[in-house]
Amino acid sequence: MPMVTRRTMTSSVSGSPLLRFAARAAIGIAFFGIVGSASLAMAQSDGQATEASQKVKFFELRDWRGKTVSLRDFDDKPVVVLAVLGTECPLAKLYAPRLQELADAYAARGVAFIGIAPNTHDSITDLAAYARRHDLRFPLLKDVGNRLADELEAVRTPEVYVLDAKRVIRYRGRIDDQYGIDYARPRPRHTYLKDAIEALLANQPVPVPQTESVGCHIGRVRQVRSDADVTYYDDIGPILRRRCVDCHREGEIAPFPLTDPEEVAGWADMIREVVDQNRMPPWHADDTGLSFANDRRLRPEEKSLIRRWVAAGAPIGKPRPLPPLPPRPKGWNLPKAPDAVFAIAEEPVSVPAEGAVAYQYYRVPTGFTEEKWVSAIEVRPGNRAVVHHILVFVFDPADPKSQRIGIDGFLAAYVPGLRARPFPEGMARRIPPGAELVFQMHYTPIGTPQKDLSHIGLVFTDPATVRYELETHAVARTDFRIPPRAPDVRVDAVSPRIPAGIQFLAFNPHMHLRGRSFRYELELPDGKRRRLLNIPYYDFNWQTDYWLEKPLHVPRGSRLHVEAHFDNSADNPNNPAPEKWVRWGEQTWDEMMIGYVTLARPRRADQRRGVP
C-alpha cells in the first residue's frame, strides 16, 4: 500500500561512509526542557532596557581550590565581567568555552572575567570538575548561600554582568542569542556581551544594557515549611523514578541526574517550571481517546504534588526505600543475542563541544544474500550523553523507491528513554537481499568534545511464522510552497484507500524548523472522520514515535489524512530565513511534510512458504 501522495521527492545517496549533512538542526535544545528565560527586574521598552545603574558592592569568595578572591583584586581593570554559572545547566556547559575565549581575547585590554557559582547543589568538587572539563582559567567562586546572586538579583544560569571601572552594572543578561528554549542557531545573531565590553572600552554607551537571561533557575537556599505534607521520599522521589530517571541519571542524555534528594531539591524551581509548561516529560500529543504505550505525561495529581512540594520549600522528609532505578541494559536489550550487528562507522565519530550539529548520515552494507525477517530490533547509542536520536532506513539498490531516504524504507529508531521490545507475535519486518542501512544521527553538544560509535542489532525469525509484515509508510506532500514571513501555512496530504486487514501500530510526524503543528485523522468508508493523533505544538528536536497500546484495525476503504501547519515568520526562533520562500527539501533550511504510519499487513499462506 504505497502511501505517498502527490508528487514525491527522489533523493540520491552518496556512496561514501558519510553520506551528507542534512541541515543545521536546532540542537535538541529545549535541553530536554530544562531551559527557561528570566523575567527582568528593570524596566524595558521594545525588548531593551534602560541604562543600568546598580553598583556592585565589595565581595570576597573562595574559588574551587580554596583561594580567596576579592573584587578589589581587580581594581586596576577597566571592565569586569561576572558570569553566574551552574555546573550542570546545559547552557552553562555550552557557553563555558565561549566565556573562556572571550576572557582570553580581552585579557590584554584589561578585561577580567569572574565566575560565580550560587547553586546549593553544586559542590566544590562539582566546580572543580566543571572548571577542568572546560579548561576555565578565570576564577570560579562558590557563592555560599547564594548571597551575591541575591544582591545581583540573578535568576538563572548562565547570566552575565558587565561592570565599568566604578563597578556599576552597565549590562546584564545573556551572553548572546545563539541558544534558547527549543532552538540552537549555527551562530549568534546578536553578541550582547561582546558588544557591551567593546562599548565600555571605547567609553561609549552600551547599545543594549539588558536582555532576558535564558537558562536554568538558580538552586537557592530554601526555607522548608514545618507543616509540609509533601516530601521527596514520600511523594516526589517515586514520581521521578517512574517518569524521569530513564534519562535523568548518570550516563544518559539528560544534562543532570535526578536520583539524589539534595540535588533534586536544588532543581525544584526548574522542575516546577518545565512541568507547568508541559516541556517535561517530553510528550507533545493531545488526548484523542487512543492509548499510547510510550505515553510519558504526568497525571494531574502528580503535577499537583510537585507544585505543593516546591511551594513547601522542597522538603526531603524521612529517608525510606524508593522504587529501584530502571535496569540499565548491560548488553543488548533483546529477547536473545542479536543475529546481526552493524556499526555506523569503522571508527568512533567526533562530536564537537558546542554549536548546532547538522544531521549526519552513514550508509552501511548488510551483506545479506537473501531476504531476512526481523522480529526484534535495538538501536544502541554509543554515547548516550550526546546522541539525541537515531533513525535507521533500509536502502535497497535494486528498488529505486527505497532510495528516497526520509520517505520510504524506515526500519527503526532510538530516542532518549526508549527501550527496545520485540514486535508482536507473528509480526516482523523484511530486509531485502543486498540492502544497506542508512543511519541518520542527531548529536547534541554538551560543552566538551565527545566520541560516538552507535550500533543496531537485529534478531531474525523464520518467515513461515510471520503472519503480518510490518511496514512504515509516508503520507506526504512535496509540492507545497511557504511564502516569506507567513505565520501559519496549512499543508494537507491523504493516503490512497486502505485495503482489508490493515492494522495501525504507530505514528511519527516529521517536519523541519518551521513546523508548527501536525494532525492525523482517519476517514472511514462512510465519510466520517476520527482523530488519531494531534500535535498542537510540534517540536523538531523530539522525533517521537507514538506507539499505540493496542493495534488499531482499519476498515477497508478508509483513508488517512494528515494536516501540517508551518510558521515561516520571524517570531519563530528556529526559523533560519523568514524572508525566503520555502519548498520541500532534505536540508533543514528547507521543509518536509511527512506523516509516517507503521502498520501490519497480513501475509498469505503461500507467501509464508516462500512461494513467489
Image: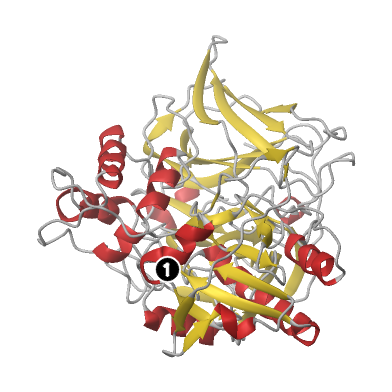
Three-letter residue code for mark 1: Glu
How far across and down, in percent of the image, does residue 482 sit? 83, 34
Viewport quadrant of the N terminus = top right
* Residue at position x 76%, y 83% in the image: 110
Direction from residue 6 to residue 288 in the image, left or right: left
Please provide percent x and percent y for residue 396. Answer: 69, 61
Position of residue 17 relative to residue 128, above or below, is: above
> Residue at label 1?
252
Residue lying at the far right in this picture: please name it: 580
442 up-or-down from 100: above or below: above
Helix, strand or loop at label 1? It is loop
| For residue 13, above or below residue 587 | below
Relative depth, front residue between 480 and 317: 317
User: Which class describes the residues within 10 Å of circle 1: few (<14), some (14-19), or many (20+)?
Assistant: some
Q: Tell me: 531 left or right of 440.
A: left
* Residue 493, quarter of the rendered image: top right
Rendered residue at 50%/64% (across/down): 89
Colour mapping: secondary structure
In which quarter of the view is residue 334 placed?
A: bottom left
Residue 253 visible in the shown view: no
Q: Can residue 572 be seen by looking at this rendering?
A: yes
Count every numbered label the image shows and give the total.
Answer: 1
Residue closest to the eye, 217 or 398: 217
Judged left or right of residue 292, residue 140 is right
Give the percent coordinates (x, y) of residue 415.
49, 57
Residue 135 on image: x %, y %: 59, 86
From the viewer's side, name the closer residue of 76 and 361. 76
